[in-house]
Amino acid sequence: MALEYEIRDGALVWIRNPHTGVISYVVDVRAKSFAFTLGDRHIPERGHPLSPEVIAHATRSCPFCPGNESMTTRELFRIDPYSRLNETETERSDPWMIRVVNNLFPRIPSELTGGRNESYIVIEDPRHFIDSPHTASDLMYTAALGERHFLQLIETDARVIRLAFENPAVRSVVVRKNQGRESGASQPHLHQQIIGAPMVLPAMDAELRAQREHPGVWDDLLALIERLGLVLERDGEAVSFQTPIGAFPRSYEVMLPAQRGMLIELPPAEMRSFARLLWRLLHVLGPLPLDYEIHQGEGLPLHAHINARLYPYSNVAGTLNLPSTIFDNAAALRKSLTRI
Ligand SMILES: [Zn+2]
Ligand SMILES: [Zn+2]
């Protein structure tokens, strides 16, 4: 399907997602009250930091904390602590920096992938809480990792993807991250999921179908993004942008338009650019609830979908309302990005 949208007086009025068919309508919501959805968010009092006892209690029962390695499934591999980072973290003495295990609950039953569990967990960092947490929700989050640590995380993802593709039953692999309770994260300790599937996963399948029907769909989308002023940053071949066809009103993408392959096939410079733009965007979004997914497939440009999950979301019968403030939001994000 070609990209369908309408622009009046220079402003986007509506756009149809060529993969899902969902139509986003741009609406002015400045006068709308979001008291119900945002009003009762708990803003904690900044009183005393959590006591060592409370911290010990939370981390003792966490399967992803150092010391509890026996609580997970067998470890597949770990990345040594901070040896190559040369950041402030070199002072720390954790037994590992990143750890990879199989997910205890495979997303796709293992009998469909040759009897092998192809769901993985990548524990992004040994730290459960941020420094001197004040509440149980002051959890460590991805944006608080250093940029080089995040690059190592993406390189670790590539290693897991290679591992999954060693299984001839695996045809498609996706990287998924949920941050925060509101995004559906089940474990508070920061981690990603990687899922190997016996077929091309439906989200990527829809993207491939749109691309087959209209090979110029990505170029058209990027040209429109540029025209609407929604591009955030570029680094080498990589580009990040606010998207009007996301799953949520505040959705972003990081894309390598010319890299039509898997994360494991990326030349090091493109891997760095991709990780860099993704990290910078996550850094600006901070500890907010969000999710991201890295999509890859034969012939598909490598890309990540990032959804900020704090804002009211309601898809009604295949329509989505896009606040007209996303254009101001893109400008504000660009400004924040220059300050990193
Ligand atoms: Zn933990
Ligand atoms: Zn995608």
Image: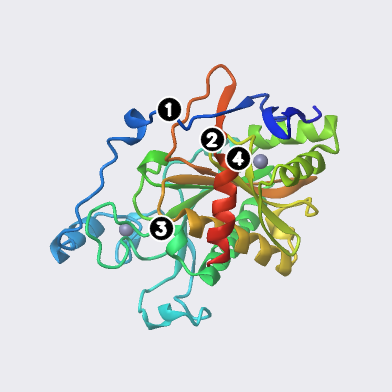
The residue identified by callout 1 is 32
Q: What residue type is labelled 2?
A: Pro
Label annotation for residue 113: 4
Please report contact status of discs 3 and 1: CB closer than 8 Å, yes or no: no
Give how far across and how far down residue 290 sits, in percent. 46, 45
Tell me the CA gap for discs 1 and 2: 15 Å
Q: What residue type is labelled 3?
A: Tyr
Tell me the CA gap for discs 3 and 1: 31 Å
Q: Which amino acid does label 1 sit on?
A: Lys
Tell me the CA gap for discs 2 and 3: 22 Å
Question: Which tag, 4 or 1, sits closer to the chain's start?
Answer: 1
The picture quadrant for ligand 1 comes to bottom left
The residue identified by callout 2 is 249
The residue identified by callout 3 is 141
Q: Which mark is nearer the camera, 3 or 4?
A: 3
Describe the element under mark 1 as helix, strand or loop: loop
Q: Which amino acid does label 4 sit on?
A: Thr
Label annotation for residue 191: none
- Residue found at x 64% / y 36%: 244
Give how far across and how far down residue 210 sits, in percent. 77, 31
